[in-house]
Image: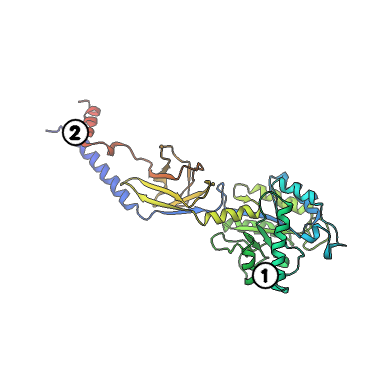
């Protein structure tokens, strides 16, 4: 016959386990979201430059590098070689300077051969502008193949975009004309029709656009032209430096990267998903699938009834660092390639319910002094 102490212990233990299981059963409909940006960033910014101005090399690049940033430079082939309509035009920087910049991590990208509006020429000529520009740039810059395009004068159409899609990974147009947000939504954006912001106005408005991008978890593509030299949409060195300083102050919220890097990440992000399987009454298995070649820094949000009650662990039991954002448990998926499995379990889970009732009886008696 059980003593009063044993009876009370058994009753409390059984009640606790039943309550624990009821809580787990109520924990249905776990939702998961993989966030697009790395390093817990809320948004992305790409700083791009059109038309191969000398000031891009002499002024923009040193300022960018001072903050650890790298830009995307859309180059016009004829301007690089001072031919065609650019024979008597203000010269670009020497090709060797652009090559050195590429070696330092800046992206060299296509702004076509002659910078002619592509929707004003015959299809064969349009294709030649796209194909030849990439071929020449690939021969000049022997690192990564050229992947990004900016349509001259921001002019394109469906047929041009589809031709460009066969050659490039992305195509940039200009500011939206339909009243929509100036930043790109990584979920829905057509990568061959990237919206851009032309910073021809005040620095205060520039700040506002960045803030809206962070609030919208979007991708802002800034399209600059000359820095303190004649040309369209001229920006002063002081304003540009002030803008970069502002971006640097938002490092915890912003990922600043060239267009090709952001496009690569969005393409991969769109293929990645996490499968959740309830493998016991108290443990969920998380499996990441679709990641190719390596495991980037994926930020994962698990939406739970009460995220404070849960933790994520690796297969070896090591707890994955996480934080609570509103009703989500947010963590960074470990970047080791072989680590495609994680486990979600309650924080207060103990190993008691893994024992047999005979073992439990022994433990209870021991604790009661029998």
**On-image quarter of the N terminus:** top left
Residue behind mark 1: 156
The part of the image, by quadrant, that contains residue 46 is bottom right
Number of numbered discs visible in the structure rendering:
2
Residue 120: x and y in percent read 73, 74
On screen, 156 above or below 264? below
Residue, far top = 369
Residue 263: x and y in percent read 60, 56
Mark 1 and mark 2 residues within 8 Å of each other at the beta carbon: no
Residue 340: x and y in percent read 45, 45
Front position in the image: 98 or 359: 98
**On the picture, is 212 further left or further right than 198?**
left
Q: Which colour scheme is used?
A: rainbow
**On-image quarter of the C terminus:** top left
Tag 1: Cα neighbours inside 10 Å, few (<14), some, or many (≥20)? many
Report the residue at 42% width, 45% height from top: 341
**On the picture, is 60 further left or further right than 335?**
right
Report the residue at 57% width, 61% height from top: 185
Residue behind mark 2: 6
Front position in the image: 30 or 85: 85
Front position in the image: 65 or 162: 162
**What SS does tag 2 mark?**
helix
Report the residue at 67% width, 70% height from top: 156
Residue, far left = 1
């Amino acid at each position: 016959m059980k003593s009063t102490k044993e009876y009370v212990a058994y009753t409390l233990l059984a009640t606790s386990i039943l309550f624990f299981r009821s809580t787990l059963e109520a924990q249905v409909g776990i939702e998961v979201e993989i966030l697009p940006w790395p390093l817990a960033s809320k948004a992305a910014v790409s700083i791009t430059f059109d038309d191969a101005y000398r000031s891009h090399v002499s002024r923009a690049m040193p300022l960018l590098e001072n903050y650890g940033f790298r830009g995307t430079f859309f180059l016009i082939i004829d301007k690089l070689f001072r031919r065609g309509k650019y024979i008597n035009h203000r010269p670009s920087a020497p090709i060797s300077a652009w090559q050195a910049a590429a070696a330092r991590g800046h992206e060299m990208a296509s702004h076509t051969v002659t910078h002619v509006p592509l929707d004003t020429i015959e299809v064969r000529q349009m294709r030649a502008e796209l194909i030849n520009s990439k071929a020449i740039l690939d021969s000049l810059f022997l690192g990564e193949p050229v992947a990004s395009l900016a349509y001259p004068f921001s002019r394109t159409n469906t047929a041009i975009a589809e031709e460009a899609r066969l050659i490039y990974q992305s195509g940039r147009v200009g500011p939206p004309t339909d009243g929509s947000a100036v930043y790109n939504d990584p979920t829905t954006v057509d990568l061959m029709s990237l919206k851009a912001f032309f910073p021809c106005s005040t620095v205060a408005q520039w700040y506002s656009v960045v803030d809206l991008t962070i609030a919208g978890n979007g991708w802002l593509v800034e399209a600059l032209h000359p820095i303190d030299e004649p040309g369209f949409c001229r920006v002063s060195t002081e304003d540009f430096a002030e803008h970069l300083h502002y971006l640097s102050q938002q490092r915890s919220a912003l990922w600043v990267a060239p267009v090709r890097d952001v496009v690569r990440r969005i393409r991969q992000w769109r293929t990645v998903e996490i499968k959740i399987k309830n493998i016991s009454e108290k443990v969920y298995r998380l499996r990441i699938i679709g990641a190719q070649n390596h495991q980037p820094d994926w930020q994962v949000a698990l939406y739970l009834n009460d995220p404070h009650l849960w933790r994520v662990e690796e297969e070896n039991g090591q707890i994955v660092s996480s934080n609570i954002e509103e009703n989500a448990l947010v963590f960074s998926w470990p970047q080791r390639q072989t680590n495609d499995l994680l486990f979600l379990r309650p924080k207060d889970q103990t190993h008691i319910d893994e024992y047999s009732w005979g073992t439990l009886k022994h433990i209870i008696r021991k604790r009661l002094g029998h």
